[in-house]
């Protein structure tokens, strides 16, 4: 039954416990605060929450440097608070996904401390060592400009250890069967505490063979199958959403030809071309990316997104395209990061213009896949470029116009709340937007409802219709005798298009899902549609009686 594959037709909301809501007034967000906000999230309509890392950590990479996989960092609460939270989610029909960061640990993790202290330690082979500095140590860094090597000498260990990311994040030797066992144990633990799956961090690096000096590292795709099987045995509806910024030709290796590896991946290819489309008004590279990422097994799914907690990585665009996005959305050096990306939130990139924000979210929500939004997106939160690195877009949630945006009673929030200026909490906050029917928040709630009521997008096949205008995208989705058509005008001015929807007789009538305008085809079966500047239109093809034609359970 299709509802079992819940991830095919839901909306995921990503948040960091640390910056969401502080209940005990110590300036740091916590599980109790988050639990108190579950009615807010349920009201918004989100189907799943993705929690960023919350395990004990020195916090040198925003929690992606873990020292204990089986606990909650005491600053956020206890395991008891965590279970209270997952229970609260269950009561409201919300699923929980958590980050699974197993490519590396913190260098403070007891495993690493033991491994470096003693060559005979049982944990020695849990990490990747070399007696001498490998010749390619200055290659393959994920954070160029901040990180200058992938191998660092540890005096105590008397050798070099491998770290794909920062030097305080030693890579686990994931080819070691003991490490693989431990990864399963970690998954099993959290599954037992009520989560429905994992956002798996850095998947290509987890599965890559890590041997000093080897140029073309072999990839152990079978590991992904092992993870999936284990999860499904333990809990049938659990899944993995992988972070893998890979080329489309690689996709099937990750999903598995028969859909026997990970269920979901973020679509980085589409994400970058989407920003290019927003910057240039040219949707052709995005259509190409959609086509290239089309082949996938039936149970697999894309996670579509706009901005996440990292930089907007533009590394897969060509030079001119990348320059166009930089020029439009991140012209200052201080807005850019790692020579490849932009460290801003979406709202400031679009000048806080609600019409353009609606266009961007409507576009993302209507791409083949499941939309993933980030806390604060629903109110158009801004960024703080005074903060270093990627922290610019990780500031606390803005709930109200009370001090610290209602995030905490402390006057020392864990990261500064954005204050003053067009994106300050004095103007941009939940309480204020809740009161106004036309606010971005209330609009987003309607968008989420609209998306959930169009399962064709999550399940169906798409066709990009010929609009004869690269600035106008028309996607039709077909699924089980039903079709929806979603049109976006990226131009800053109105345009008229003349469209053959296809679908035979059914395609003669288009009913607008969001407002009362419908369209009937002329004698040549073509629809003439006038689209306002930055317009987005969601149509049901062939009338509203689709409910009667729906056959799924
Ligand atoms: C992923 C995360 C990023 C983190 C890195 C190391 O890329 O998205 O935030 O720094 O992994 O764990």
Image (cartoon, helix red, strand yellow):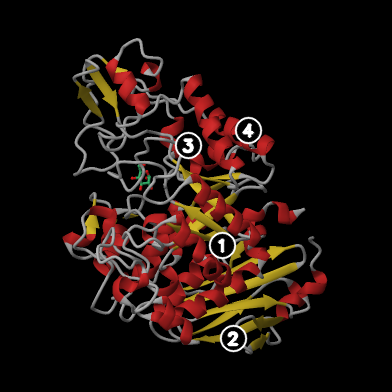
- As measured in the structure, the alpha-carbon distance from the residue carrying label 1 to the one carrying label 4 is 25 Å
Query: Which x, y percent locates residue 278?
Result: 38, 69
Query: Dot 1, how many residues are within 10 Å of its Cα: few (below 14), some (14-19), or many (20+)?
Result: many
Q: Is mark 1 on a helix, strand or loop?
A: loop
Q: Which of marks 2 and 3 is nearer the N terminus?
A: 3
Camera-nearest residue between 278 and 142: 142
Q: Name the residue under label 3.
A: 70
What distance separates the C-alpha of mark 1 from that of mark 2? 32 Å
Of callouts 4 and 2, which one flags the residue occurring earlier in the amino acid sequence? 4
Which mark identifies residue 230?
Answer: 4
Residue at the disc numbered 1: 11
How busy is the neighbourhood of tag 3: few (under 14 within 10 Å), some, or many (20 plus)?
some
**Is the C-beta separation of discs 2 and 3 under 8 Å?**
no
Residue in the picture at 65% in, 86% down: 519
Q: Residue at x 23, y 50 (%)?
A: 339
List the single residue furthest toward the top. 120
Q: How far apart are marks 4 and 2 (CA)?
A: 52 Å
Left or right relative to 32: residue 553: right
Q: Distance between the residues labelled 2 and 3?
A: 59 Å
Mark nearest the camera among 4 and 2 is: 4
| Front disc: 2 or 3 | 3
Task: Tell me which numbered mark, 1 or 3, is placed earlier along the sequence.
Answer: 1
CB under 8 Å between callouts 1 and 2? no
Q: In this view, does 285 lie to the left or right of 451?
A: left
């Amino acid at each position: 039954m299709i509802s079992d594959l819940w991830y095919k037709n839901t909306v995921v909301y990503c948040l960091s416990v640390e910056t969401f809501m502080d209940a005990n007034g110590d300036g740091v967000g916590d599980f109790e605060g988050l639990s108190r906000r579950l009615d807010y999230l349920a009201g918004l309509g989100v189907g799943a929450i993705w929690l960023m890392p919350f395990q004990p950590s020195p916090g040198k990479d925003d929690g992606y440097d873990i020292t204990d996989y089986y606990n909650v960092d005491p600053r956020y609460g206890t395991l008891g608070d965590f279970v209270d939270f997952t229970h609260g989610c269950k009561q409201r029909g919300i699923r929980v996904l958590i980050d699974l960061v197993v490519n590396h640990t913190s260098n403070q993790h007891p495993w690493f401390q033991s491994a470096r202290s003693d060559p005979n330690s049982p944990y020695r082979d849990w990490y990747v060592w070399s007696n001498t500095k490998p010749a390619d140590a200055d290659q393959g860094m994920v954070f160029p400009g901040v990180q200058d090597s992938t191998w660092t000498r540890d005096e105590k260990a008397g050798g070099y250890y491998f770290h794909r990311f920062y030097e305080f994040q030693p890579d686990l030797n994931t080819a070691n069967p003991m490490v693989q066992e431990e990864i399963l144990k970690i998954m099993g633990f959290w599954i037992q505490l009520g989560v429905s799956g994992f956002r798996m961090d850095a998947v290509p690096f987890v599965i890559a063979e890590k041997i000093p000096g080897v140029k073309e590292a072999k990839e152990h795709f079978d590991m992904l199958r092992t993870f999936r099987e284990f999860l499904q045995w333990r809990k049938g509806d659990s899944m993995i959403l992988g972070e893998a910024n890979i080329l489309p030709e690689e996709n099937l290796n990750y999903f598995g030809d028969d859909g026997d590896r990970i269920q979901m991946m973020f679509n980085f290819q589409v994400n970058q071309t989407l920003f290019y489309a927003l910057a240039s008004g040219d949707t052709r590279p995005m259509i190409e990316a959609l086509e290239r990422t089309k082949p996938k097994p039936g149970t697999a799914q894309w996670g579509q997104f706009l901005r996440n907690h990292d930089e907007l990585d533009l590394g897969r665009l060509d030079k001119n395209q990348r320059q166009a996005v930089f020029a439009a959305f991140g012209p200052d050096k201080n807005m850019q990061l790692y020579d490849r990306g932009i460290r801003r939130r979406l709202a400031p990139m679009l000048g806080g213009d609600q019409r353009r924000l609606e266009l961007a979210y409507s576009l993302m929500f209507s791409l083949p896949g499941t939309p993933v939004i980030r806390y604060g997106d629903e109110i158009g939160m801004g960024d703080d470029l005074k903060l270093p690195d990627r922290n610019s877009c990780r500031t606390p949630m803005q709930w109200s116009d009370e001090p610290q945006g209602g995030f905490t009673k402390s006057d020392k929030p864990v990261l500064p709340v954005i204050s003053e200026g067009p994106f300050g909490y004095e103007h941009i906050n939940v309480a204020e937007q809740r009161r106004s029917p036309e606010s971005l928040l209330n609009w987003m709630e309607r968008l989420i409802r609209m998306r959930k009521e169009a399962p064709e997008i999550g399940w169906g096949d798409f066709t990009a219709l010929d609009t004869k205008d690269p600035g106008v995208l028309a996607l039709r989705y077909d699924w089980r005798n039903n079709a929806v058509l979603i049109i976006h005008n990226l131009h800053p001015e109105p345009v008229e298009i003349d469209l053959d929807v296809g679908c035979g007789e059914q395609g003669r009538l288009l009913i607008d899902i969001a407002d009362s305008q419908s369209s009937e085809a002329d004698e040549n079966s073509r629809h003439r549609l006038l689209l306002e500047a930055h317009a987005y239109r969601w149509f049901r093809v062939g009338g509203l009686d689709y409910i009667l034609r729906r056959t799924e359970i």
